[in-house]
Image (cartoon, rainbow, N blue to C red):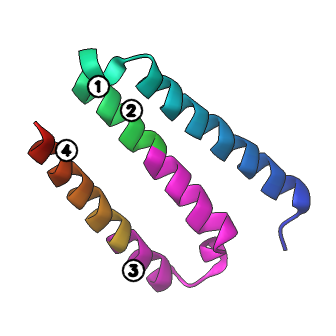
Amino acid sequence: MTSTKLYTVIYVVLFVLATVQVLIEQAGFLDSVYWTAFGVIMLLSTVKALLVVGYFQHLKFEPRAVALVVLAGLLGALALTAAAAYSIL
């Protein structure tokens, strides 16, 4: 069983990562170095998604097959996001 302290630490990490993503956008990095900023935002989003799935949705404690199904969905979402980014340009 996980503790409240662990959930609090994960929440703070998620908050910090989201703040970094907003700061990247607000600083105008998406205008000047788009692909670098886009890559950093996608990496941070992936880390956030894995933390949420692993701990808040308790997949860390599930059989590996369930986690692989969720991972396939995440990869599909990332592929669609990347395709949408190409259509913007």
Circle 2 sits on which residue?
40
Look at the numbered disc 3 and give the secondary structure of its residue: helix
Residue, x 18% and y 51% (percent of image)? 84
Eye-nearest disc, 3 or 1: 1
Amino acid beneath label 4: Ala
Q: Is residue 28 magenta?
A: no
Disc on res. 58? none
Q: Residues within 10 Å of mark 1 (few under 14, many from 20)?
A: few
Q: Which of 55 and 14 is in front in this view?
A: 14
Disc on res. 36? 1
Does label 4 or label 2 sit earlier along the sequence?
2
Cβ atoms under marks 2 and 1 closer than 8 Å: yes
Circle 3 sits on which residue?
69
Mark-to-mark CA distance, 2 and 3: 25 Å
Amino acid beneath label 1: Thr
Eye-nearest disc, 4 or 3: 4
Amino acid beneath label 2: Val
Tell me which segment is drawn in magenta.
45-72
Cβ atoms under marks 4 and 2 closer than 8 Å: no
> Eyeballing the image, is 45 above or below 65?
above
Disc on res. 85? 4
Look at the numbered disc 1 and give the secondary structure of its residue: helix
Cβ atoms under marks 3 and 1 closer than 8 Å: no
Eye-nearest disc, 2 or 3: 2
Q: Nearer the viewer, residue 67 or 22?
A: 22
Amino acid beneath label 3: Val
Residue 85 percent coordinates (x, y) = 19, 44
Does label 4 or label 3 sit earlier along the sequence?
3
Q: Does the magenta stretch include residue 58?
A: yes
